[in-house]
Amino acid sequence: MSRRPEGELRRGWTTGACATAATTAAYTALLSGTFPDPVTVHLPNGLTPAFALAREEMGDGFARAAIVKDAGDDPDVTHGALVAATVRKAAPGSGVVFKAGDGVGTVTLPGLPLAVGEPAINPKPREMMRAAVARVAAGLGDAGDVEIEISIPDGAALAKKTWNPRLGIVGGLSILGTTGVVIPFSCSAWIHSIHRGIDIARASNLTHVAACTGSTTERIVQGLYALPDIAMLDMGDFAGGLLKYLRAHPVPRLTIGGGFGKLCKLGAGHLDLHSGRSQVDHDWLAETAESCGGDESLVAAVRTTHSAANALALARAAGVPLGDAVAARARQTAVSLAGVGIAIEVIAIDRSGHIAGRAGG
């Protein structure tokens, strides 16, 4: 892990935010002949940052703009990368069509939140770009039928430093981000925040807290139990930091909410769930599938599949409760660390935001 800079950490912008800014500038130029520089974008969290253009180009039927990504103080492999958008008019009624340009990957395997053959531009950045196109189209009197090609020069080389090749994303990077903002952190700072959250919950005499791996799981768990915000612990990938502290500073009841893949790691005994520091053990996952009724063919398929999400899909198709089994094993790991004095429940969430399994409710 990169060394933490001194002082307050500076936030940055995701590849999705940069792609949205480049798209906004290029589409505006395509319609008006002029590139806005700097170009302002509207992010899902209400922020409206302005981005300076690094490149701008007009040609026969297209406009292209590029932004240099600033990841702030986060040790992001794409910091300093050039994120470019080429915008062309598309057939009437086609809406917004996305293409992978140089350095942006293409999905080749099932199990991701994008169909096979699609550019590796995640759903939230697509939503941001569609909103930007609609805003520009409304302002300049266009129908908003466009083709957006996102490219990142050197993206193919940068992608080798990520898990994209193992996920079946070939040819480059993914365009990522849910809020548009990169929030830098260090492990110690994040774990410290978890500990302080537990302290606050105890001081407030809360009897039920929830620890979640991300915003989607937090939303689902909080909705299930109508827990107050101070009961929600931003565990992220640091299950070990949470559970070890709870052993010495217990609360009566804990719900752990996590993505299915991350809970596969916890079930196998990993305490740091980050993709760079632990991986899904497919032998373990296959054995778990067998333990809950999977036949020989399912076990073999789970052992060789490329992702935990696809393993879950295979098990569901076979009527095997793999989600519940993974949640139960994750709960065993949690109990072994936090102690039997805490009533622990585990809820696994799939990629579509639905409950995939529960244990200890």
Image: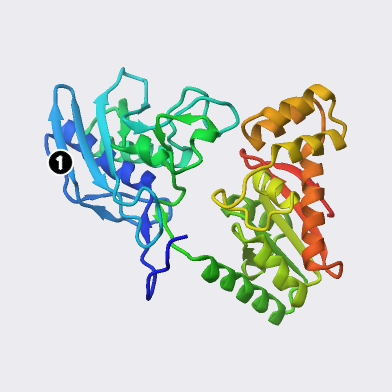
Look at the picture and state if 94 lies above or below 204: above
Look at the picture and state if 19 lies above or below 145: below
Q: How far across and down, in percent of the image, does residue 319 sit?
A: 82, 28
Seen from the viewer's position, the closer of residues 165 and 58 is 165
Q: How far across and down, in percent of the image, does residue 247 sit?
A: 77, 72
Give the residue furthest to the top.
Answer: 91
Q: How far across and down, in percent of the image, does residue 342 sit?
A: 82, 68
Quarter assignment of residue 235 = bottom right
Look at the picture and state if 40 lies above or below 301: below
> What residue is shown at x 81% (from left), y 39% (from top)?
288
In the picture, measured across the screen, residue 12 lies left or right of residue 312, that is left
> What residue is shown at x 44% (from left), y 47% (from top)?
177
> What residue is shown at x 16% (from left), y 39% (from top)?
56
> What residue is shown at x 72% (from left), y 66% (from top)?
243
In the picture, measured across the screen, residue 147 lies left or right of residue 220, that is left
Seen from the viewer's position, the closer of residues 91 and 323 is 323
- Pointer 1 residue: 35
Q: How far across and down, in percent of the image, does residue 326 sit?
A: 77, 44
Quarter assignment of residue 6 = bottom left
Q: Say few, some or many: other residues with alpha carbon within 10 Å of mark 1 (under 14 / 14 to 19 / 20 or more).
A: many
Seen from the viewer's position, the closer of residues 323 and 268 is 268
